[in-house]
Image (spheres, rainbow, N blue to C red):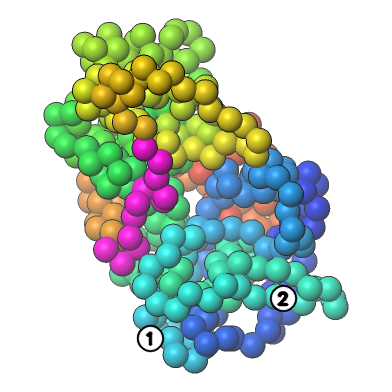
Amino acid sequence: MKAAAAILVETGRPLELVELAMPALKAGQVLVEIAYSGVCHTQLLEARGYRGEDKFLPHCLGHEGSGIVRELGPDVGKVKVGQKVVLSWIKGSGANVPGSVYDWDGKPVNAGAVTTFNKFALVSENRLTPIGDELPMPLIALLGCAVPTGFGAVLNTGKAQAGQSVVVFGCGGIGLAAVAAAAATGCDPVIAVDLEPTKLALARSFGATHTLSARELDPVAAVRELTKGGADLAIEATGRPLVMTQALHCVRQQGGQAVIIGNARHGETLTLDPQQFNQGKRLLGTWGGDSDPDRDYPGYAKLLAGRVDLTPLIPGSYTLAEVNKALEDLETGRAFRPLIDLSRIG
């Protein structure tokens, strides 16, 4: 069987649209027909070569998507043929199968345990979560990365409570999901910080009570003033070390927490003032919002079907042949969370 895929052949160059022949399913693998794939800054960093040396070229990309199960490998019991699924880089229950090697006209193409920039993909059982019919396929795709990371950073890592003050730095897909989660939890104020007016406007529609332009003012001073001394929780979703420092500086003494989501470029470092920790502040990392797919994804889906509407994040979609435009639009801020519609190849 052959299927279209957009693969990374060389870092710093556009992805190539090719036809890949798939090997036989291994034990614990599932053949999934991808419906929609999200495009994340992780893929942007990979494609541009900002994550350092890439030892697996050429390879498939994508770690967030929605799809339908088409075939099961031996010993798979978590999903059924015909079932809708979330594809996610975050591990859930089930077999952990490292990946596959596809064939591209006699040349090997590597693929990890989950990839989504391809019409059909061989996916490890533990990267799949069955999902009901309450959400359309585009929104199901967001459950693979943007939603669990943004929601989870607020709810799991930061353990936000109603009435607490929350500031979110960076209003891309993950940051806006964090804004929506904080608002849905009853946090107040919910402050969004970004450089782009369009992103700040969208943050207000997702529940931000205040928006701050980092181009026009010092966000740390502004947050401290709005919260009368410092926020209870700061979420950093930009991947910029300077902003990570700002997130720590703007939380309150004696219990304020800063959660770092963003991926910095390879080689970048973070300089910290130790006195921030002497003040009783906490700097936390998070692995996908500390989300557990089996435990959390059904609940996140209910939020998306009820109190939280993230459809403004994805006003349109791209064909697979437009994947490089999707990456460019993400990089320049013209798109908040690009989605690739795998029903349209060219």
At horizontal 29% and vertical 25% (from top left) the residue drawn is 281
Tell me where the magenta segment starts and ends, as one range.
Answer: 284-295
Q: Give the quadrant of the N terminus.
A: bottom right
What is the secondary structure assignment of the residue under circle 2? strand
Of callouts 1 and 2, which one flags the residue occurring earlier in the amino acid sequence? 1
Image location (x, y in percent) of residue 322: 69, 51
Q: Residue furthest left?
A: 163
31 relative to 46, above or below: below
Mark 1 nearby-residue class (10 Å; few <14, some 14–19, many ≥20): few
Q: Is residue 288 magenta?
A: yes
Find disc 1 in the rendering and name its residue.
77
When asked about the image quadrant of residue 177, the answer is: top left
Image location (x, y in percent) of residue 31: 54, 80
Distance CA(mark 1)–CA(mark 2): 24 Å
At horizontal 74% and vertical 58% (from top left) the residue drawn is 55
Q: Which amino acid, mark 1?
A: Gly
Q: Which amino acid, mark 2?
A: Tyr
Image location (x, y in percent) of residue 321: 71, 56
